[in-house]
Image (cartoon, helix red, strand yellow):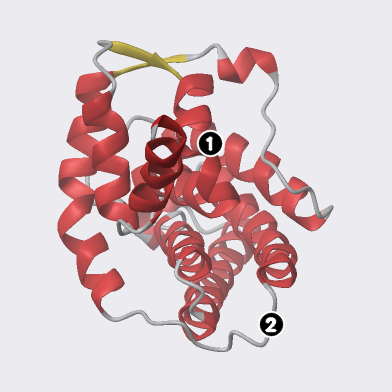
Amino acid sequence: MKIAQKEKVPMSIKEHPTSDFLAIVVLENRKEILTVGEIKHALRERGFGILLALAAVPICLPIPVPPGYTTVFSIPLFIFSLQMILGMREPWLPTWIENKSVKRTILEKIIAKADPWLKRIENRMQPRMTYISVHTWERVIGFFSFVFALAIALPLPLTNFPPGCGILIMALGLLNRDGLTILIGMIIGTIGIGFTMIVLVMLWMGLSMPAFY
């Protein structure tokens, strides 16, 4: 009987939407301070999709942030996207990142702000273009995420949000096996890259940031 109960628990967790799954992981952990490694281990069963989504969510929140905020969150995006391009089956993080700590209250605030519109996106998703394997999608998403992370890493205002949203939408599409949603995320992120290129060209031409914005 004990073996049967153990087998049922992961299945019930996997059936939860991503938005609910994130909340469950935080609520079930009683510690006030969590390490990045603990969060990764708790989310491991959903692979790269959930970790990409978690790294992209803070970039997509419409809140004022300090300088260098998006650059910090671009680091795990670079790491995960490279691993996806290489075809790795399980996410890996260097020890110094896994040992970084995050307050539980901060995670709760991020999830609370993201939950309403994550649910709106998830309600519109369904399995589509499933003839393309998840592993193939992971490699394609890895390439696009790496390019989008380049724009996110740049300390330029207004250039981080569209690529971040693109990564988040692709990750949610991967988790729900929705190829159409993945393509929409690619388009949104690519538009963001185009906007970033325009800003860089204008800066190269000598247009000051205050005059442009």
Identity, as a three-letter code, of the amino acid under mark 2:
Ile
Q: Can the viewer see residue 54? A: yes
User: Of helix, strand and loop, which one carries label 2?
Assistant: loop
User: Of helix, strand and loop, which one carries label 1?
Assistant: helix
Establish if 122 lies above or below 61: below
Front-lying residue, 118 or 213: 118
Q: How far from the left and from the top, in percent, is residue 154?
A: 57, 45
From the viewer's perspective, tell me whether residue 197 is left or right of residue 67.
right
From the viewer's perspective, tell me whether residue 200 is left or right of residue 89.
left
| Residue visible at 46% across and 34% down in the picture | 3
Q: Which quadrant holds residue 34?
A: top left
Q: How far from the left and from the top, in percent, is residue 165?
A: 41, 62
Front-lying residue, 12 or 104: 12
Callout count: 2
From the image, tell me which residue sits under label 2.
Answer: 132
How far apart marks 1 and 2 lie (CA) works out to: 32 Å
From the image, tell me which residue sits under label 1.
Answer: 71
In the displayed image of the protein, which residue is found farthest to the front? Answer: 1
Q: How far from the left and from the top, in percent, is residue 133?
A: 70, 75
From the viewer's perspective, tell me whether residue 61 is left or right of residue 100.
left
Identity, as a three-letter code, of the amino acid under mark 1:
Thr
